[in-house]
Amino acid sequence: MSVIKPKIDDLLDKTDNNRFLLASVASKRACDINSMLREQHSRVLAVQDIDDITIAMSGKDTISMAMEEIVDGDISFEHDKYEAALGHKAAEE
């Protein structure tokens, strides 16, 4: 048994128990974090010869950072837009 922090059940609670939605929200946020850190690196050039600049600068990988933000409630999704995109209900104008 492995310990995952944050717990998957807590993460799923934040995304209507939808694993696909959780993966989508987390991967989108992880890409945003990665881009932001790479831009900072380009400006500062403080860290050199390191392949994974994100881990070097933050100590965590971007997907872990994104998952923590989801479980803390720092990022979420718009339920109505999500349902409309799936075709479960009409988009509100």
Image: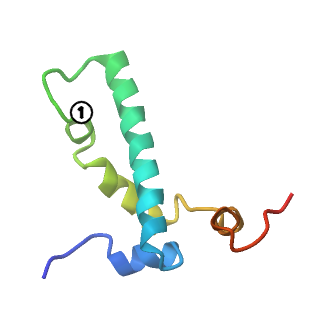
Residue 52: x percent and y percent? Answer: 20, 36
Going by the image, does 51 lie left or right of 16? left
Q: Which residue is mark 1?
A: 53
Asked if residue 75 is positioned above or below residue 79 in the image, the reply reads above
Q: Quadrant of residue 36?
A: top left
Asked if residue 15 is positioned above or below residue 91 in the image, the reply reads below
- The amino acid beneath tag 1 is Ile
Element class at badge 1: helix
Which residue is depicted at the point 66% across and 62% down?
Answer: 85
Q: How many marks?
A: 1
Going by the image, does 31 lie left or right of 5? right
Which residue is depicted at the point 49% across and 66% down?
Answer: 21
Asked if residue 35 is positioned above or below residue 85 in the image, the reply reads above
Is residue 69 among what the camera can see? no
The quadrant of the image that shows the C terminus is bottom right
Camera-nearest residue between 56 and 93:
93
Which residue is depicted at the point 23% across and 33% down?
Answer: 53
Residue 4: x percent and y percent? Answer: 24, 72
